């Protein structure tokens, strides 16, 4: 996975001559379970005005959840994404991402030995971006992660999070 990320980063840097600006977007995440609150964060890093897109970037996020010291889960996502400007006058954009995620889980009841699970799955994301000027925008969206049932401790094979953040292009 790290080799693919390094290769994509090199690919993005190769197009630096064709881009006008840098795209940076930190965010915070809520979910994937009811009541988990702010449980993670992420970062998009890439180039704006590249290959006919408003932005082309790599995205990373880390989300963790713990319940009463019995359940603990961690999700890390690695995606490549693009931002497409929908409305030029008010500069509203749509972001779409696709990639992989890593899952690690631990469950220990008082009377049992701890159980562990880990695996990889598919991750997609969509966000809506509203710019207030040429350099600063706000985004909100959702992340959707899918994994095989035998690679997780829970009964769900679907993990969803809500993310909100800022987009900075300079």
Image: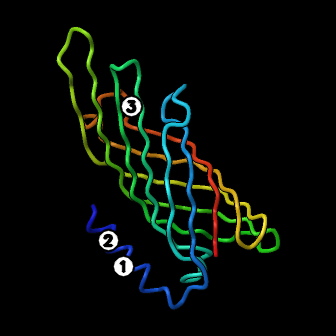
Name which residue lies at 78% across and 69% down: 133
- What residue is pinned by disc 2? 6
Q: Residue 65 in the image: x percent, y percent?
A: 42, 32
Q: Are marks 1 and 2 in contact (CB under 8 Å)?
A: yes
- Relative to residue 31, is residue 115 drawn left or right? left
Regarding mark 2 in the picture, which secondary structure is present there? helix
Name which residue lies at 66% across and 57% down: 128
Q: Quadrant of the N terminus?
A: bottom left
Regarding mark 1 in the picture, which secondary structure is present there? helix
- What residue is pinned by disc 3? 156
Q: Residue 116 in the image: x percent, y percent?
A: 22, 30
Q: Quadrant of the C terminus?
A: bottom right
Q: Which mark is residue 42?
A: none
Residue at the right extreme? 89
What is the count of numbered marks?
3
Q: Are marks 1 and 3 in contact (CB under 8 Å)?
A: no
Q: Which mark is residue 10?
A: 1
């Amino acid at each position: 996975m790290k080799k693919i990320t390094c290769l994509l980063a090199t690919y993005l840097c190769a197009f630096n001559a064709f881009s006008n600006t840098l795209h940076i977007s930190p965010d915070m995440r809520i979910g994937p379970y009811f009541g988990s609150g702010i449980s993670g964060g992420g970062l998009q890093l890439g180039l704006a005005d590249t290959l006919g897109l408003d932005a082309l970037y790599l995205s990373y996020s880390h989300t963790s959840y713990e319940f009463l010291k019995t359940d603990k889960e961690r999700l890390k996502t690695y995606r490549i994404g693009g931002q497409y400007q929908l409305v030029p006058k008010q500069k509203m954009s749509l972001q779409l991402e696709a990639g992989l995620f890593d899952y690690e889980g631990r469950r220990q009841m008082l009377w049992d030995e701890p159980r562990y699970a880990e695996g990889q799955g598919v991750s997609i994301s969509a966000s809506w971006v509203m710019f207030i000027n040429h350099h600063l925008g706000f985004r909100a969206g959702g992340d959707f992660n899918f994994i095989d049932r035998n690679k997780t401790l829970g009964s769900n094979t679907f993990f969803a999070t809500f993310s909100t953040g800022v987009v900075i292009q300079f």
